Image (cartoon, rainbow, N blue to C red):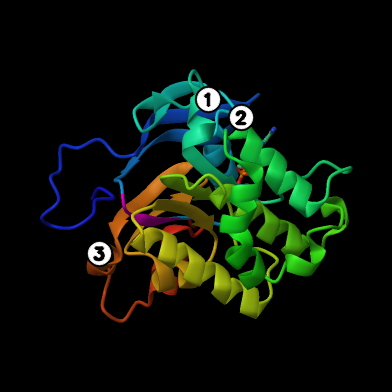
Amino acid sequence: MDCVQGENTPAAEPGLVSIQNVTKKFGMKVALDQVSFEVPAGQLCGLLGPNGAGKTTLFRLLMGILKSSRGKLFVDGRDAFEDRVVVKTLVGFLPDEPVFYSYLSGREILELSASMHGLNPKQTMKRMAPMIDRLNLKDDMRNFAEDYSRGMKKKLGLLLALLHEPRLLILDEPTNGLDVESTHLFYEMMKEESQKGVTVLFSTHLMDQVSKLCTHSIIINKGKVVMQGSLDELRAEFDDSYSLEEIFLTLTAEPAN
Ligand SMILES: Nc1ncnc2c1ncn2[C@@H]1O[C@H](COP(=O)(O)OP(=O)(O)OP(=O)(O)O)[C@@H](O)[C@H]1O
C-alpha cells in the first residue's frame, strides 16, 4: 500500500517528498530503520507514531538538520542534506518546539525572515496581517517572542512556516500544547492550505487528528513503517469492529513475550 492520492492518479510520479530506505542511528540507537515512503504533491498526509517512534528524527532529516546513516531523502527531487539550503526555501517547517532569537519581537522575526526569503518585509507583513489577526497575535507583535507562551510560539512558528507561501508544509506535532480553540484553528488553516494545493505532511501521536484531517497516513513504530496508505485501505486490513484508534494501538502495540 503506497501513500498515493486517488485511484486515477498516475502511479509512476515520484512524490514531492520521497524517503528512500532511510536508516538513522545515534550511536548504537537505531532511531529509523529502512524507512521508505512517498508523499505525492497535493496530499495532506499524517505521520503517525507513539512517543519515540522517530517522527521528529525523520523531519530533521528532511530539513537537512541531520544526515542519514543510510538511504536518501528528497524534497521536490532535491537531496534533503546535500541541497539543504535550497530545500529550506521550498519548505515551510514548524518544529515541535520553535525557538526564537531572544532580542527580537514577533514582528521583527517575521520581517527578518521575509528578508531572508528575498521578500519585501512591509508588503509581507501587510499580506500576513489577516493571518496574524486570526491567530490572535496582533497585540503581541511588539513583544519579545522569547516571552511568548508555548501556544503563542507555536502560532508564530506557523506564521513563519507560511510566510514565503511554500509548496510544502512540514509540521512537527503542530497542535501539541495548543488549547481547543487554537487546535481547531490550526486544523482549519492546514485544510485551507491543502485546498490551495499546498502539500502538507504533519506528525502526531493522535489517530483522531489524522482521521479528522487526512485521507492518507504513514504509521511508524520504533523507527519502522508499520502501515501506509489511505484510511480506507487501513480500515480494510482490519475487522469492521475495529475503530481507527484501535487499529493504531494494535499496529503500535508491544509484541507479547
Ligand atoms: N540526538 C539524539 N541522540 C540520541 N538519540 C536520539 C537523538 N534524537 C532522537 N533520539 C532517539 O531516537 C528515537 C526517536 O526519537 P524522535 O524524537 O524522533 O521520536 P518522536 O516520534 O518524535 O517522539 P515524540 O512523539 O515523543 O516527540 C528516540 O529513542 C530518541 O531517544
Spatial CA distance of label 3 from label 1 is 37 Å
Element type where label 2 sits in the image: loop
The mark nearer the N terminus, 1 or 2, is 2
Q: In which quadrant of the rendered view does residue 116 lie?
A: top right
Could you say whether the residue bearing mark 3 is in a helix, strand or loop?
loop
Mark 1 crowd level (few <14, some 14–19, many ≥20, 10 Å Cα): some
First-in-chain label (3 vs 1): 1
Q: In what quadrant does ligand 1 lie?
A: top right
In this rendering, the answer to whether 34 lies above or below 42 is above
> Where does label 3 land, which residue?
237
Q: Which mark is residue 65?
A: 2
Q: Is residue 250 visible?
A: no
**Cα–Cα gap, marks 1 and 2:** 8 Å
The reply to whether the residue tagged 1 has its Cβ within 8 angstroms of ligand 1 is: no
Name the amino acid, label 1: Arg
Q: Please report the bounds of the magenta region as a residue range.
A: 42-46
Asked whether the beta carbons under mark 1 and mark 2 sit within 8 Å of each other, the answer is yes
Out of 185 and 165, give the one closest to the viewer: 165
Q: Are marks 3 and 1 in contact (CB under 8 Å)?
A: no
Q: Earlier in the sequence, mark 2 or mark 3?
A: 2
The residue drawn where x is 69% and y is 75% is: 179
